[in-house]
Structure formats: C-alpha cells, structure tokens
Amino acid sequence: MEPSIFIQLVVLGLVRGSMYALMGVGLSLIFGIMEIVNFAHGELFMIGCYIMYFVAAMLGLPFPLGILASGVGLLIVGVLLEKGLISTLRNKAGREWLMDSFVLTIGLMVIFQNLALIIFGAVQRGIPNLVPGQIVLGEVVFIHDHLVILGLALLTVGLLWYFIKYTSLGKAIRATSQHSEAAQTLGIDVGRMYSIAFGIGAALAGIAGALLITLFPANPNAGMAPVLKSFVVVILGGLGNIKGATAAGIMVGLLEAFALFYLAGGWQNVIVFSIVIAVLIFKPAGIFAPAGERP
C-alpha cells in the first residue's frame, strides 16, 4: 500500500472512530452511573443534527455556535428527561425499574422518531461542509471537515475526561458510579448526579450529531446507524468504561476504514460484529476492561 493511501485511510478511520467514541462515551457514562441502557441515544444524536441545521443553515450562524447549541440543548433535554421520566420511574417502580427503563427508552426512541417525521417530514436536511477546502501535502489530501471533526471530537472527550477525573462534581459522579449508597451516606445528592450524568451523555450525542451533519444529514432516522455502532463500542470497551469506549471507538473506525478499502461494501459490518460476538463469548467484560473485572 502506498504511504499516502495508508495515511488517508488512517485519517478517515480516526474521523469515524471519533464519532463512535463520542456516542459510545455518552452511552457508557449513562450506563456506568445509572446502569440503564438508553435506546433513545440515537434520537438524541438526531436532535443534535436538527439543531445544527437550524443554527448553521437556516440562521446562517458560524458552525461553532451550532455545535454549542446542540450540546447545551441536548444537555437540557437530557436533564429534563431524567428528572421528568427516569427519576419518576426509579422512585415508583422499585426493584423492577431497570427493566422498565429499557421499555421507557425504547418508547422515547419511537416517539422522537415519529415526532421528527411529523414535524420535518422524511426530507434529509444537511449542510455541505463545516469548513470548505482541503490541504494537499504531496499525494496526501486532508479535507478540512475531517480535521475539524477529529479535532473537536478528541477535544470534547479530553475535556470530559478532565471533568470526571479532576473536578469536585466529576469526583462525585465517579463516587456515585462506584457505590451510590456509600456516596449518599457521604452527603452526595445521588439523584442530582444521575440527572447530570444523563444530561452529559445526551450532550455528547448532540455534539456528535452536530459535528457529523455533513455525513449524516438531519432526518428522522439519522441516529440509527451511529447508535448501533455506539452499542458496539460500549460492548468492546466495557460497560461503564469511558476510556475503554474511547479506545474501542477508534479501533472500530480504523477497522471500518481499511475494510471498506480492501473489501466489498458490507464486509466492515461483518468483521466488526464478528468481533463483538467473539468478545461477548470470550471476554464479556470488554476488551479494554480492567483485568479481573466481571461483566
């Protein structure tokens, strides 16, 4: 393989992987804190796409404002969903609330999809690019959009890691994820941590939707493909493992880029899901889970 082709495949894989990482980290954060699987995560991605389209295409504002609006908007949506629905379910359903939460998030998925179809129709709404142009270095071509997506995605994940690792609120979230009852004994408002965690997970999905609108135009089904891969990332990285989800996202993106180049279309999904099945059989805690950790 020529070095120029190899470099461009790596960049393409990193762009795909950064998207999967953003989605997977949000999903993993929600599971790690609340132990629920958010099946409506793809629809939060979809809402982020629509917000980005409204801000950048209809209002004509700079794309960073669209990304900011998507992140803040989905943060608010996530907190409201957790406070209004998930928290209520947790308080009323007792021990069965986790199973009921699966049904709840599936219901939210169907509702959001059909609301988008009713309001916006099935028309795809996208924007041609975030930053037009490209950089040519010899035989290697770097598209500006790809560099922007990669840079902002990695920056977002890095900021999240710093927030969780070093801030007092992040430490409270980590304490809640490790042992909610002990955290409550120490004076941590566990309900507040749940709302913040769900809001941050939703915000990450919204940012991913805003960044990827050039590749995934806003439409009622825009989140279906990204959320499927985000579940793959969470399984490979380990449930609730943020660093593992990031590494798994990059790995999946690189695998897909090279598989698309060397093999016929569709084989990338066969390879990725074959790996998922193997991981579920031989290392169900995830490839990147700490040694000795059980699923």
Image: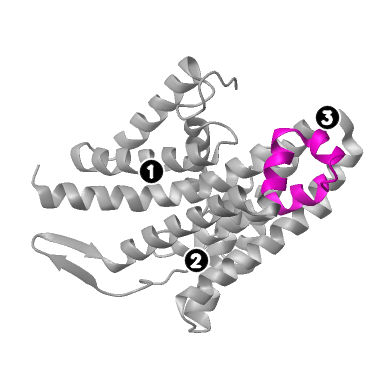
In space, the residues marked 3 and 2 are separated at their CA atoms by 39 Å
Q: Is residue 153 above or below residue 135?
A: above
Task: Residue 2: tell me if it is visible.
Answer: yes
Question: Disc 3 vs disc 1: which is toward the camera?
Answer: 1
Kind of residue indicated by mark 2: Val
Task: Residue 37: tell me if it is visible.
Answer: no
Q: Secondary structure at mark 2?
A: loop
Please tell me the numbered disc located at residue 96. 3
Q: Is residue 272 above or below residue 74?
A: above
Q: Answer with left or right where residue 153 lies relative to residue 271.
A: right
User: Magenta residues, as a range?
Assistant: 171-198
CA neighbours of label 3 inside 10 A, class few (<14), some (14 to 19), many (20+):
few
Q: Quadrant of the N terminus?
A: top left
Where does the image place residue 256, in percent across and percent down from the top left? Answer: 31, 41
- First-in-chain label (3 vs 1): 3
* Residue 185: quadrant of the picture: top right
Where does the image place residue 68, in percent across and percent down from the top left? Answer: 56, 70
- First-in-chain label (2 vs 1): 2
Task: Check if residue 207 falls in the magenta segment.
Answer: no
- Residue denoted by label 2: 123
Q: Residue at x 20, y 69 (%)?
A: 135
Where does the image place residue 278, in percent across and percent down from the top left? Answer: 42, 20
Residue placed farthest to the bottom in the image?
60
Q: Quadrant of the C terminus?
A: top right
Please tell me the numbered disc located at residue 250. 1
Kind of residue indicated by mark 1: Ile
